[in-house]
Image: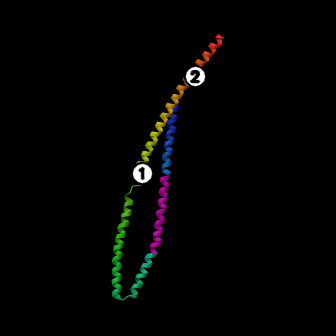
Amino acid sequence: SARDDLERRVHDLRLTRQVAMQSLPSIRLVQENDKTLVNKINSTLINTVPLWKNQLAQAVTIFRMSDAADTVKKATDLTNELLESNAENLRTANAQVRQQMERGVFDIESVRKANNSLIETINDSLRIAEEGKAKRAKAEQEVKTMESELRQALIAAKARKGEA
């Protein structure tokens, strides 16, 4: 019937609205994460480049102040340490970047939760619609019963009045 079609259309619109509302927090979260990542990268560059310059200046000063053998030993030790540290840092950073690159746009668990929630919403809507329809049918039956009782009471009242 037209009423059922309208109820279904309203139901569809409510579902569409809910899906759209679910998208808004996701978009905001992605935007916030992007902003945070850009700030973190900028902060890293701002803090790391001066540190590198400072470390280089210290290495030059140490080289000039020490004798040749001590300087060569320290430079060699520092180079080895930097090589090892950079290799380890590269490994760690590469693993972090790769993990993020290989990660899906959405975690499957989040998609699963959203899907389950949507299914529950749909099932709830159907159940509520069925309950509403049943309540309306019951109320309609009760109204018919009350109308019948009222008619009977009116007929009885008219009959008594006619007898009097």
9 relative position to 116: left or right: right
Spot occupied by residue 136 in the image (x, y as percentages of width and height): 52, 30
Occupied quadrant, residue 103:
bottom left
Residue 30 is a magenta residue: yes
Residue located at (46% from left, 36% from top) = 127
- In the image, residue 76 sits, relative to residue 129, either above or below, namely below
Tell me the amino acid under the disc marked 2. Answer: Glu
Residue located at (38% from left, 63% from top) = 96
> Which dot marks residue 72?
none
Spot occupied by residue 11 in the image (x, y as percentages of width and height): 50, 39
- In the image, residue 48 sits, relative to residue 112, either above or below, namely below
Label pair 2/1, CB-CB below 8 angstroms: no
Residue named by callout 2: 147
Residue named by callout 1: 110
Q: Foreground mark, 2 or 1?
A: 2
Quadrant where the image shows the C terminus: top right
Q: Which residues are magenta?
A: 25-49
Assess disc 1: are there few (<14), some (14-19) or many (≥20) residues with their C-alpha within 10 Å of its C-alpha: few
Occupied quadrant, residue 162:
top right
Describe the element under mark 2 as helix, strand or loop: helix
Residue located at (49% from left, 42% from top) = 15
Q: Main secondary structure of the magenta part?
A: helix
